[in-house]
């Protein structure tokens, strides 16, 4: 895997969905393939742009690209019992039946995702997501403002509710945790959610 820091101009980072599209351009010739990168906006402000941290299976191309600020091979060694700090921006949700009773193509009631807005629900959500791999020793939950986006091609707008998790974990099953790192956590990965960063204590 590779870890990259990318600085996008503000005009290309105003719409969260555009950030995802700009990052795709760093992997030329792979437009029709499945996305294999995760990212998180670390800093964003008008006149500066967006500093983005990206984890990818493939090395991003720097050819004709002034956005790439740093890139390195991302090698991780995990051990059972190891304690690590982590950071994760996520979109904690639950799935419910459509309140209007609308049906899908199979004639079943549609399912809808709704955000978990209470801290105790958010804590249980992250515990479930990590339970196959590690124990949660400590956790700080920071509520964030809603993230509004638009998909120009589909003329569709929407919003997601993100949460920033910081804490300490103890590794129980290294292989399972590595799988979580690679796959990301939760939905809305195209909008900068799911990337779990770790650091030694």
Image (tube, rainbow, N blue to C red):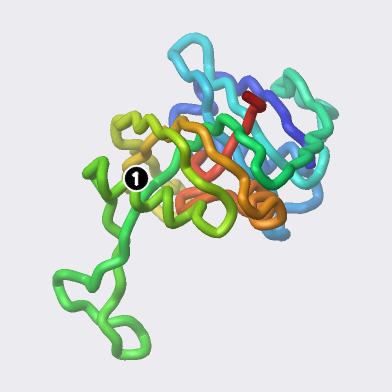
Q: Is residue 189 left or right of residue 151?
A: right
Q: Could you tell me which secondary element the residue under label 1 belongs to?
A: helix
**Visible residue check, residue 156:** no
Residue at (50% x, 19% y) in the render: 43
Near-viewer residue (20 or 128): 128
Q: Which quadrant, please, contains the C terminus?
A: top right
Q: How many labels sit on residues?
A: 1
Near-viewer residue (27 or 51): 51
Residue at (56% x, 30% y) in the render: 85
Residue at (79% x, 26% y) in the render: 71
Residue highlighted by disc 1: 123
**Visible residue check, residue 72:** yes
Residue at (47% x, 37% y) in the render: 137
Q: Is residue 22 left or right of residue 145?
A: right
Q: Is residue 80 left or right of residue 160?
A: right
Q: Position of residue 190 (x, y in %)?
A: 53, 47
Q: Which quadrant, please, contains the N terminus?
A: top right
Q: Position of residue 17 (x, y in %)?
A: 49, 41
| Quadrant of res 66 | top right
Q: Position of residue 31 (x, y in %)?
A: 71, 53
Classify 118 as above or below 105.
Answer: above
Given the current orientation, which residue lies at the most extreme bottom position? 107
Q: Position of residue 39 (x, y in %)?
A: 59, 37
Q: Is residue 37 left or right of residue 139?
A: right
Classify 193 as above or below 52.
Answer: below
């Amino acid at each position: 895997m590779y870890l990259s820091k990318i600085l996008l101009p503000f005009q290309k980072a105003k719409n969260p969905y555009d950030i995802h599209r700009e990052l795709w351009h760093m992997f030329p010739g792979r437009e029709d393939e499945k996305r294999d990168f995760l990212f998180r906006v670390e800093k964003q402000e008008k006149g500066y742009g967006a500093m983005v941290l990206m984890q990818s299976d493939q090395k991003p191309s720097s050819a004709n690209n002034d956005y790439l600020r740093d890139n390195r091979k991302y090698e991780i060694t995990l051990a059972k019992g190891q304690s690590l700090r982590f950071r994760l921006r996520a979109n904690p949700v639950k799935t419910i039946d459509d309140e209007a009773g609308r049906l899908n193509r199979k004639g079943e009631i549609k399912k809808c995702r709704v955000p978990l807005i209470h801290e105790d629900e958010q804590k249980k959500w992250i515990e479930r997501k990590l339970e196959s791999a590690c124990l949660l020793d400590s956790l700080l939950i920071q509520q964030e403002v809603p993230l509004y986006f638009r998909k120009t091609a589909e003329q569709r707008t929407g919003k997601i509710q993100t949460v920033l998790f910081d804490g300490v974990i103890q590794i129980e099953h290294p292989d399972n945790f590595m799988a979580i790192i690679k796959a990301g956590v939760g939905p809305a990965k195209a909008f900068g959610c799911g990337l779990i960063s770790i650091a030694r204590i």
